[in-house]
C-alpha cells in the first residue's frame, strides 16, 4: 500500500474546462508539467496542492493527502508552492517573509535551516529589505527560499520564471538546477517553455485539453517520433553527458554519453568532469549508409535504425535511431528515406551537424 | 464647570464604546460582504447601508418602539431583569452601534476586497490556518481600512443628534450628549455656551479629519510600518 512516488488522480470542472488525469510520478527529481496555456497544467498543480477542490486521490511517497472520503486542507499538506506572480507578503520584510512558513512548522520537522536556505538562494544581503525594493528575480528567489523553509515533502512550482525577463531567468536557472540535484524531495514544475523543460526536467508530463497525452522520462519522450505537439522544427533529443576532454587547439570539448561521444564548441564556463545536458535537433542529424570522412561534419556516430515514421508531414519523415542505448531523431525527406532504403534494424552512421548545450 | 464638561465626557464615552463594539461586530460582517457570493449578500449590504439614507428620526423611532415596554427587545430585556433601554446610556450605545454601522463596515469591506486573494493562498501553502491567515495577513494589510473605519465611526457617533433625541431624551450625565447640549443652550438663548461647544466640535472634527488623511497618506506611501 505504501507505494513510493506520487499517485495523483483528479477529476474536476472549472467553468467549462474539465480536468481528468491519473498519474504515477517518480518520488524524486524534477517532473515538468508541459503544454500550451489552457491545457490544465496549472489546474492540476492546484488540485495537488488542494487549492482547487476536486474529486480524486493524492498520495506522496506513501502519505495520503486526499482520497474518495476526504481531503486534507492546504495548510495541513506538507507541500510548498511557488507561484507564477510575485507572492511575497508586502507588509513583511524579506526575513519575516522567510520566517512565515518556517515558524509555522514544528521544530522536529525542520530539515532545512534558515541559514541554509538563505545561502542556497543568495539572500543574505536582502534580509532587511521590503519586497517592493527587490527586483523580479530577487523576489522569486525569496519566494523559493520561503517555500523550502517549510521543509516540504513535495515542491510545486507554477511557471516560476514566466513573469521574469530573460536576464532574471538566466539568473535563477542555476539555483533551480542546484535544488533539483541537491534536494531529495520531488519537484513538479509547470512550464510551457521547451527551453526550461529541456534544461531542468528529469521526467515530463505532456498535457492537452485537461488530459495527459504523454508521460515518461524526458529523454524517452523527447525521442518519440510522434510528438504530441507539432514540435516538428524543435523536435530533438536531450542527452545527459559528462565533459571528459578539452582540445585547446581547436577550441572543442568532448562530451561522453551512454553510447558514444560528441564534440562541441569549448565554452569558458565548462570544466572537465562537469555534467552537462545537450540537445540534438532532428533537423541537424542526417544519415549515411557508411562512414563518410571526406565531408565537413565531425560528429559521426554508428547507430541502428529503430523506427521510421514516414510522412509526419507531407514529404517529411522522422527516423528514430539508437547509438548504444541512446536514442536520436533524424528528420529527412521522405524521398531520402526511400532512396537509402532505410528500415528498422539497419546499421547507419549519424552525421550530427550541430550540438547545443542546454542553458 | 462639571455641568459644562459632562456632555463632552459622555459624548466621548459613547463614541468610544460604540467604536470598540463596532470594530468587533463590523469586522466579520465586512469580511463576509467582501468575500461572499451568496445571493443574500446584496440584501445584507443594503440593510447595513440603510442608516446612511434613513433620517435618524426614523431609526430612532423604530428603536424606541422595539426597545419600549411593548416592543420585542423591550420585553426580552425586562424578562432578563435589565429593565428598559430607552433613556439609558446603554440604550444610546445600542442605537449608536446601529446608526454608525455603515461607517465601520464600508471602509473595512473596501480594504478587505482590495487584498490580493493569492496572498491568502500563499499563506495557506505556508501552513497558515484560515484564522491564522486572517490575523497575520488580512488585518495588517487592511490597516488603513481599520484606521478609517475607527475614525469615521468615532466622529460620526459624536455628531449624532436625531437618534439620541428620539431614544435618549435629555438626561444630564446619562444621555445628554454634546449635540443635545448645544441644542439645549440655543433653546435657552445661552449663545455663549452654545458657541463654546459648537466651535469645539468644529475644531475637533477638523483635527480628526486632517489626522486621518495624513495618516492614511503615509500608510499608503509606506512610511508608517
Image (cartoon, coloured by chain):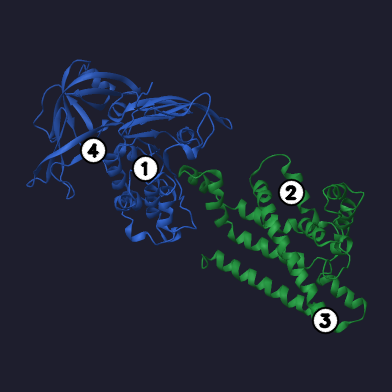
Chain colours: A blue, B green
Mark 4 to mark 1: distance in Å? 37 Å
Q: Name the residue under label 3.
A: B195
Whether residue B164 sits left or right of residue B18 in the image: it is right
Q: In which quarter of the image is residue B142?
A: bottom right
Q: Name the residue under label 2.
A: B45
Q: Name the residue under label 1.
A: A108
Residue A306 picture location, percent across and down = 23, 19
Residue B48 picture location, percent across and down = 76, 51
Q: Which chain carries label 4?
A: A
Give the secondary structure at mark 3. helix
Q: Mark 4 points at which residue?
A: A277
Give the secondary structure at mark 2. helix
Q: Are callouts 4 and 2 both on one chain?
A: no
Using a 10 Å C-alpha cutoff, classify the residue at mark 4 as few (fewer than 14 neighbours), some (14 to 19) or many (20 or more).
some
- Tell me if label 4 and label 2 are in contact, CB under 8 Å: no
Q: Mark 1 lies on which chain?
A: A
Residue A298 picture location, percent across and down = 12, 35
Mark 3 to mark 4: distance in Å? 85 Å
Amino acid at each position: 500500500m505504501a507505494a513510493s512516488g506520487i499517485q495523483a488522480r483528479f477529476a474536476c470542472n472549472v467553468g467549462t474546462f474539465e480536468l481528468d488525469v491519473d498519474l504515477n510520478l517518480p518520488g524524486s527529481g524534477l517532473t515538468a508539467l508541459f503544454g500550451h496555456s489552457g491545457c490544465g497544467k496549472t489546474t492540476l498543480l492546484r488540485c495537488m496542492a488542494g487549492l482547487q477542490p476536486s474529486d480524486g486521490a493524492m498520495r506522496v511517497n506513501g502519505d495520503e493527502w486526499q482520497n474518495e472520503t476526504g481531503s486534507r486542507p492546504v495548510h495541513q499538506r506538507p507541500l510548498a508552492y511557488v507561484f507564477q506572480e510575485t507572492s511575497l507578503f508586502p507588509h513583511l520584510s524579506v526575513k519575516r517573509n522567510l520566517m512565515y512558513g518556517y515558524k509555522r512548522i514544528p521544530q522536529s520537522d525542520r530539515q532545512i535551516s534558515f541559514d541554509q536556505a538563505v545561502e542556497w538562494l543568495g539572500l543574505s544581503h536582502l534580509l532587511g529589505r521590503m519586497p517592493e525594493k527587490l527586483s523580479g528575480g530577487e523576489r522569486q528567489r525569496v519566494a523559493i527560499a520561503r517555500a523550502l523553509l517549510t521543509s516540504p515533502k513535495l515542491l510545486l512550482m507554477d511557471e516560476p520564471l514566466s513573469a521574469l525577463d530573460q536576464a532574471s531567468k538566466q539568473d535563477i536557472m542555476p539555483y533551480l538546477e542546484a535544488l533539483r540535484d541537491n534536494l531529495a524531495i520531488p519537484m513538479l514544475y509547470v512550464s510551457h517553455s521547451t527551453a526550461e523543460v529541456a534544461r531542468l526536467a528529469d521526467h515530463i508530463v505532456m498535457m492537452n485539453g485537461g488530459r495527459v497525452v504523454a508521460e515518461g522520462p524526458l529523454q524517452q519522450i523527447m525521442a518519440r517520433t510522434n510528438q504530441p505537439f507539432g514540435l516538428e522544427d524543435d523536435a530533438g533529443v536531450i542527452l545527459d553527458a559528462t565533459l571528459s576532454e578539452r582540445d585547446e587547439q581547436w577550441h572543442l570539448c568532448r562530451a561522453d554519453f551512454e553510447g558514444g561521444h560528441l564534440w562541441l564548441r569549448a565554452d569558458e564556463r565548462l570544466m572537465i568532469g562537469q555534467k552537462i545536458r545537450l540537445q540534438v535537433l532532428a533537423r541537424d542529424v542526417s544519415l549515411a549508409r557508411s562512414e563518410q570522412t571526406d565531408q565537413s561534419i565531425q560528429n559521426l556516430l554508428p547507430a541502428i535504425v529503430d523506427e521510421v515514421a514516414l510522412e509526419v508531414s507531407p514529404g517529411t519523415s522522422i527516423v528514430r535511431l539508437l547509438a548504444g542505448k541512446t536514442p536520436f531523431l533524424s528528420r529527412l525527406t521522405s524521398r531520402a528515406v526511400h532512396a537509402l532504403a532505410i528500415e528498422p534494424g539497419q546499421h547507419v552512421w549519424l552525421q550530427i551537424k550541430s550540438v547545443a548545450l542546454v542553458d | 464647570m462639571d455641568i459644562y464638561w459632562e456632555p463632552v465626557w459622555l459624548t466621548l464615552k459613547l463614541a468610544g464604546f460604540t467604536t470598540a463594539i463596532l470594530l468587533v461586530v463590523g469586522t466579520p460582517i465586512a469580511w463576509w460582504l467582501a468575500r461572499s457570493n451568496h445571493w443574500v449578500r446584496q440584501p445584507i449590504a443594503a440593510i447595513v447601508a440603510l442608516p446612511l439614507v434613513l433620517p435618524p428620526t426614523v431609526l430612532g423611532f423604530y428603536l424606541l418602539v422595539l426597545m419600549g415596554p411593548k416592543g420585542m427587545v423591550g420585553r426580552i430585556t425586562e424578562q432578563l431583569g435589565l429593565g428598559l433601554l430607552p433613556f439609558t446610556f446603554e440604550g444610546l450605545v445600542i442605537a449608536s452601534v446601529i446608526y454608525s454601522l455603515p461607517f465601520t463596515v464600508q471602509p473595512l469591506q473596501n480594504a478587505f476586497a482590495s487584498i490580493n486573494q493569492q496572498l491568502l493562498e500563499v499563506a495557506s501553502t505556508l501552513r497558515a490556518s484560515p484564522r491564522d491567515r486572517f490575523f497575520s495577513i488580512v488585518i495588517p494589510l487592511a490597516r488603513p481600512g481599520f484606521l478609517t473605519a475607527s475614525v469615521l465611526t468615532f466622529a460620526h457617533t459624536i455628531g449624532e443628534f436625531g437618534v439620541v433625541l428620539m431614544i435618549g431624551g435629555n438626561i444630564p450625565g446619562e444621555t445628554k450628549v454634546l449635540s443635545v447640549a448645544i441644542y439645549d443652550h440655543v433653546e435657552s438663548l445661552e449663545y455663549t455656551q452654545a458657541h463654546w461647544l459648537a466651535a469645539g466640535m468644529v475644531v475637533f472634527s477638523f483635527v480628526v479629519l486632517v489626522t486621518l488623511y495624513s495618516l492614511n497618506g503615509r500608510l499608503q506611501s509606506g512610511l508608517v510600518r
